[in-house]
Amino acid sequence: MDYLQGLNPSQKAAVEQTEGPVMIVAGAGSGKTKVVTCRVAHLIHKGVDPFHILVLTFTNKAAKEMRERIIKAVGAEANNIWMGTFHSVFAKILRVEANKIGYPNNFTIYDTDDSKNLIKTILKEMQLDDKLYNANFVYNRISSSKNNLISAAEYVSSPTIQAEDSSSGRGQIGQIYQTYSQRCFKAGAMDFDDLLFKTNVLFKEHADVLYKYQNRFKYLMVDEYQDTNFSQYLIVKKLAAINENICVVGDDAQSIYAFRGANIQNILNFETDYPDLKVFKLEQNYRSTQNIVNVSNSVIANNKNQLKKTIFSENETGDKIKVSRAFSDNEEGKITAEAIVQERSISGAQYHDFAILYRTNAQSRSMEEALRKLNVPYKIYGGLSFYQRKEIRDLIAYFRLVYNPNDEEAIKRIINYPRRGIGDTSLERIMIAANQNNVSIWDVICDASKYLDARNSTAVSNFAIMIQSFQTMTQSHTAYDLATHIAKQSTLLKDLYDDKSVEGLSRYENIQELLSGIKEFSEREDIAERGLDVFMQDIALLTNDDKDKDPNADTVSLMTIHSAKGLEFEYVHVVGMEENLFPSQMALSSRSDLEEERRLFYVAITRARKKLILSYATSRYRWGSLHSCEPSRFIDEIDPQYLELEFKPVPKKGDQSFFGDEQRSPWQEKETISRPKGIISKPKTTSILPKAHIPSEGFAPSDTSGLQVGMEVEHERFGYGKVINLDGNKSDIKATIFFKELGQKQLLLKFAKLKIVK
């Protein structure tokens, strides 16, 4: 029984309660996996046949880890446990029982690509607009229906669903769903969602089969129960109906997958389903410092819909949580990268001890660029590096072709993307003609009528004309204007915009982020060369080494918060702590969505063992224009006594001069703000934090030809500053200005937007 050693009283009690319905509410870092594995080991030790135990996990990785731990505790018997993900376990059952619902036992399992290709075929046959009926959108709609146990027949006969589809102009989805289901059935195939949907059908229509598995699985355990959907919930409930030896493990505070159909009510209402339920709360956090745990508690307390628990830590108090302000998203990247380098040199930490977490994939751009500039190795988890994403590579291929029309790889990538009727056969003919006539591919494209038949040449000529029109703009347009024009005229932007699926939205956001990066580059006031070709050179250096060569390399981890669930790091940077970014703008319309965002923030906080750093930018480019950003409301929800606010106070109104004669200005010093003792009413933290500079009324840049050292100036974005040096010849004078809010910056006067104050 040595597997019981080292368990705290709550953990031990949860392990030993093997009979009847049990819910283990496991806070972040509370040793959940340990409890689950010990509990299974305890069942076997008590004489329960492993063949009668079913353990359902959410990932294959979790199942593998648990099985290895159980084998260590009880030996090879653990191999006989039914353990795996919902999909793998019920696929195994369907392999035996599928014939009862009309499927062959050797049915094919369609992956996502197979399903989407079938949907595309059906759309073509039905002659539907594949922009309106985007395959991703249709797939997600069908998937969501199956997870809510709505069959194709029920979908078509539901007035509510039909009215919803009709109002969005997609009244044919029901028909697509029916055809899709029929085709899958005819092909003897099930898609991923069918593995659960058809299991429910099997259990509903064949009581004898359900009875067989109810008696087979005398003990059920479900991990990450807060992330179950309706289909999963019902299967578990049916299987446990006879013996009621069901144990669910989860943390409602970490329920963050509502967009994938997860229903938090499954865990919140578990007691309703099983009135004689025994609840065990694992409240001791073994992962994080006391300060980090206190911060997570003060945030999640704002959610009304939750199971009450008090997480505590007996670890060291630890550092306060630092809140860093950046002027822009690029500067936020720079501050974060520098902080990692500094922490590493002070503490001797490894790169793999650091994680940068963000709300959306698009935010990785500024982080990646900053890390590269400091030669900090990093790895993107749960996705591709920003410049390796397909949509980014597609648009960059257009840029490449504009500056180098002989770039064959760029031609091949975009000649028919978005589709313009130049298929593989046409491309092949172009390449053959180029070889035979000893000219470049681009020469053939420009003179298509000479080398190709009339049917093929028209579309190719139109492509050439489009690229040539882009080339004529390179000298007269800014990098941003040119890039935006290319994105629009190539119809790439429209193609992505029309895809309303979650993936499509993400791809569109990534393109907008690239354009925002170009906008910021084109408005830099410290460099003379700001064309799109110069930007291309910069990013070429970032993209030439993006392939992950060594999976075990010492790298900083970059990922979305969703991807970080279940992981932990010594040092965690949560970036982009701004309203409309985190919480997301889309989450502000309902309480349940906002609470989901707050749970997501809770997950981000609780990934940190030693140090947590939050950062926000006061301005960000979105859709080509600069927006001022407000710090996130979530910062307000953290008790200020646990915070270290790093900022430079703004000068008081009424100051005659923004710069006094004092040798050392107070605004040059870092201040730590904590709540004064004995004061109950406290100002909101976000009211103390610095915001974006608001230009003075009637702001207009001055003629700076007479600018001198010592003059005080105002910059539209950087605020107030003092000229401390002027350098260079007349046309390229560089001014070094000390800004109150930002410190020292170098600007080229001919580009700088400065108003002389005095």
Image (cartoon, grey):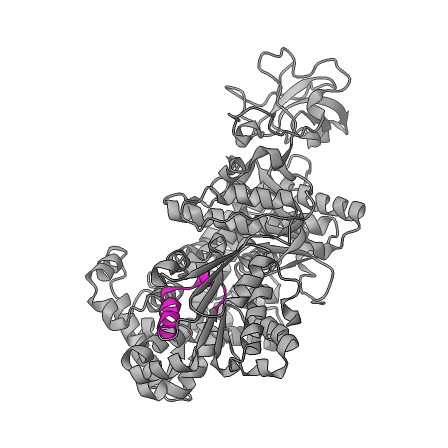
Pinpoint residue 748: horizontal percent, then vertical percent.
69, 31
Q: Total number of numbered labels? A: 0
Q: Is residue 238 magenta?
A: yes
Pinpoint residue 756: horizontal percent, then vertical percent.
63, 18
For the point 64% across and 44% down, which residue is it? 290
Visible in this render: residue 120? no
Pinpoint residue 508: horizontal percent, then vertical percent.
47, 54
Visible in this render: residue 650? yes
For the point 67% across and 65% down, which residue is it? 547
Q: Is residue 213 above or below residue 319?
A: below
Q: Is residue 667 above or below residue 112?
A: above
Pinpoint residue 367: horizontal percent, then vertical percent.
64, 49
Which stretch appears magenta? Answer: 222-241
Q: Main secondary structure of the magenta part?
A: helix
Quarter containing the C terminus: top right
Q: Is residue 8 magenta?
A: no
Q: Nearer the viewer, residue 431 or 326?
A: 326
Quarter of the view holding residue 71:
bottom right
Q: Is residue 301 above or below residue 658?
A: below
Q: Is residue 720 above or below residue 275?
A: above
